[in-house]
Image (spheres, rainbow, N blue to C red):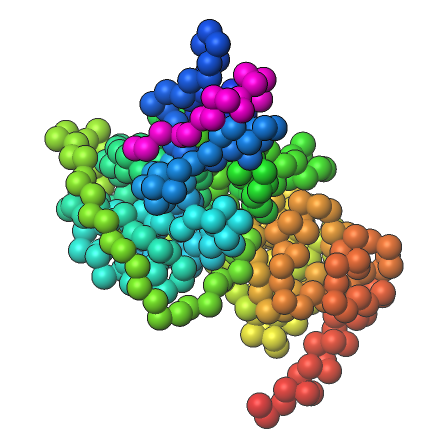
Amino acid sequence: MTALAIDRDLCTLCGTCVGVCPVDALAIKGDKLEVNENCTLCGTCVGVCPVNALSIPEEAAKESAFSGRGILVYAERGDGGITSATFELIGKAAELSATLGTPVSALLLGHGAAHLASELFAYGADRVYLSEDPQFADYRTEVCGETALAIVEKFKPEAVLLSATVEGRDLGSFLASRLNTGLTADCTELAIDPETRNLLQTRPAFGGNIMATILCAKNRPQMATVRPKVFAMPERRERTGEIVTCEPVRIPHPRTEVLEYIPFEGGVDISEAEVIVSGGQGLRKAENFALLRELAEVLGGTIGASRSAVDAGWVAHERQVGQTGKTVRPVIYVACGISGAIQHLAGMNQSDIIIAINTDPEAPIMKVANYAVVGDLSIVVPELTRQLKELLKGR
């Protein structure tokens, strides 16, 4: 790789670049600044040099388009295709990459999965690193992790994004530990600092009482997991990209073997619902959820709940909306008797239309609602249900 250019006449040996280098590639030795083989040409030092003594040669910029630069999204597979959460991440990565001036890449592991690359391109990926092998038919930490690690080490992306699913969290922690870098879990927002190229990773902290923005300034790649539905699904467009075939790292004797896959039956995934009617502590007792179920049935939706309602044992945890439950993005979200703690808002504030029913006009949920109804839900909900039945009769 072409080296970082240092103008010895301009350099004052101030050490600013040394302090910001995320890979410890710069050091002052004697009377000159030196760059070692760790340099990924990320450009962080170029942006902070007070005398403009550092630069990336034009040929190096071309050479390093995918070496030490850019964002990599792990393409998670499910039900024979790519998960919608992966496409959401690719859409966000495209936004971030516009600030970085770099392309978006995706990492696809599978067996007979090459045809899925076209979908990754359609949703915004510029390049797909594809590794195919029968061992990737089912996800296993060791088997998939070693190949993913080899690809990340070879192409050196600035950031790696994964879905905050069971698989994404598992692979993310494996990669972060092996790469000796940081991993921010369950992010609700991502942004780029254009001066330092740091990924600004925001997530609720201290029980959801504050929103913390976390940086990984000294290590690369920067890594984050993001819950499904946090970001909007990008528009699908017919476009093409480059497929880079990568050799799998074969594990002769894996420590785990998938004997059988048994899908979970009888549960509900509220993150996929178009209409959700949620209840909170304001319902006072479990029996009052019957009012919400009737309204949800009329609207063709499902039931959700706040953490307090779940903790009280009124509904199952699988219906909890919020930071410690599911992140949802329905067309209509009806919040009944929910105050709107920051943990709950983090899980539903991207809904298209929010309707809040609460006796407290100052409740936080009322501030984010498109329609706020001040009243007793035991009166408002049955009347709303009755009128909707009349309106929808015969349709």
Query: Residue 125 at x, y = what percent?
Result: 37, 56
Q: Residue at x 36, y 65 (%)?
A: 122
Q: Name the foreground residue: 118 vs 62.
A: 62
Residue placed at 55% from the left, 31% from the top? 52
Q: Is residue 143 visible?
A: yes
Q: In terms of depth relative to the viewer, which is nearer, 228 or 15?
A: 15
Residue 363, position as x, y percentages in the image: 82, 53
Of residues 160 and 47, the one nearer the viewer is 47
Indicate the position of residue 171 as horizontal and vertical percent values: 36, 37
Would residue 252 be counted in the magenta stretch?
no
Q: Is residue 285 above or below residue 199?
A: below
The vertical placement of 301 against 205, above or below, is below
Q: Which residues are magenta?
A: 1-16
Q: Residue at x 15, y 46 (%)?
A: 134
Residue plotted at (59% across, 33% down): 214
Residue farthest toward the front in the current orientation of the protein:
9
* Residue 293 visible in image: no
Q: Quadrant of the N terminus?
A: top left
Give whichever of 113, 263 is nearer the camera. 113
Q: Is residue 13 magenta?
A: yes
